[in-house]
Amino acid sequence: MPRDYYSDLEIKADASHDEICQAYRRLALRFHPKFSIMDEKTTHHHFSIISEAFEVLSDPMRRAFYDKFGEEQLKQGFFHKGELAGGYKFHKNPLEIFEKFLCKYNPLADIVDLTGEHAHGTMFGYQFQAQNYQLTHPPEPVYLEVECSLEEIYNGCSKEIQYYRSLLNQDGRTTREVLANKIVQIRQGVKDGATVVYKKDGNQAARFDNSDLVMIIKEVPHSRFKRKGNDLVYTQYINLSQSWSFKGVHLITLDSRRLYIPIDEVITPKTVKVVEGEGMPIQFDSLKGLKNKQLLQPYKDRGNLIIKFDVEFPTQLSIEELKKISELLGENEENGDRAN
């Protein structure tokens, strides 16, 4: 469901810039880890929500684009001076946003003395020379959706991906955003929505270990096959006349083999042919007893290929065609009676 940044800050859509800042200030004092009475996870969740909303609405260009096109388009990309600019991305850095807000607007000067010795060691971080400041939360993992074709999942493959991660600067405290490359291995039979974790390849933050890179597999729909668990479903389209004399199914498998499945029966819309061992490689989580080296070997166990038939019935038939069909059906019925 699309985010409503105005509701996140508890303001109206026509709020002024000052009202946006005041709302963020009020909510930041409620949800900041130094002040919140809620548990750490809930505090961080709410603090992140209002920080993202403020980061969008306090920027005139982002706000204007969001008002017109909404959150999804804002994050996909937007035009600026005739060129498509990169989409907005919230980097889950609420404390950094809060400190920048303090530096620019100094809204808490009436609450806390930010000058002289009282500024040192306070909650306001390194911008105010707080050498004892520590992050309350470790860096967030990097979540990345990786699209894979059914062929790639069937055969297994290597893919080079790019993603943004936060790295520490030389001062060991602040971070910068960099574009990273990673060669990832897609194992045979991995399921749609499965996660692959690369330890410590995510974000960095002062005083914490690196977070993880978490890849989420997204299976791209295939033009010929539909996956159902470990099975593959293939639909063969035929017309009514073929249903009486159809000899077999010719198809190209996901590993580029030519496969022929003979058919020796009259085809109806309910006919199903099962070919054992021609489905997807069995998902590797069912092979937990195997060692790592064994897991890298080609899988011998596979699901089944399920062939269904879509029989196209004619919308109109001539009298002669109806007579032929009637004769054929009558002959079959007569033969059946004789057999009995």
Image: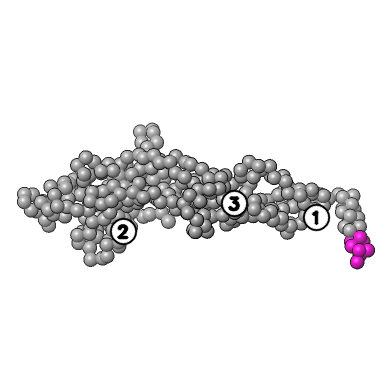
Q: Amino acid at mark 1?
A: Val
Q: Which is nearer the N-term, disc 1 or disc 3?
A: 1
Residue at the left extreme, as displayed = 117
| Residue 43 belongs to the span the image colors magenta | no
Q: According to the image, label 2 marks what residue?
A: 45
Residue 15 in view in this figure: no
What is the magenta range?
Answer: 333-340
Question: Which residue is located at x 51 percent, y 54 percent?
Answer: 284
Residue at the top extreme, as displayed = 82
Residue 227, given in percent of the width and then of the height, sits at 59, 53
Q: According to the image, label 3 marks what residue?
A: 300
Residue 184 in view in this figure: yes
Residue 227 as seen in the image, left or right of residue 250: left
The mark tally for this picture is 3
Identify the secondary structure beneath mark 2: helix
Question: Which residue is located at x 28 percent, y 43 percent?
Answer: 167
Residue 132, given in percent of the width and then of the height, sits at 14, 52
Q: Which is nearer the N-term, disc 2 or disc 3?
A: 2
Residue 12 as seen in the image, left or right of residue 172: right
Q: According to the image, label 1 marks what residue?
A: 266
Q: Amino acid at mark 2?
A: His
Give the class, few, some or many, for how many residues have Cα within 10 Å of label 1's Cα (few <14, many ≥20). few
> In the depicted view, which residue is nearer to us: 320 or 20?
320
Question: Which residue is located at x 30 percent, y 44 percent?
Answer: 166
Give the class, few, some or many, for how many residues have Cα within 10 Å of label 3's Cα (few <14, many ≥20). few
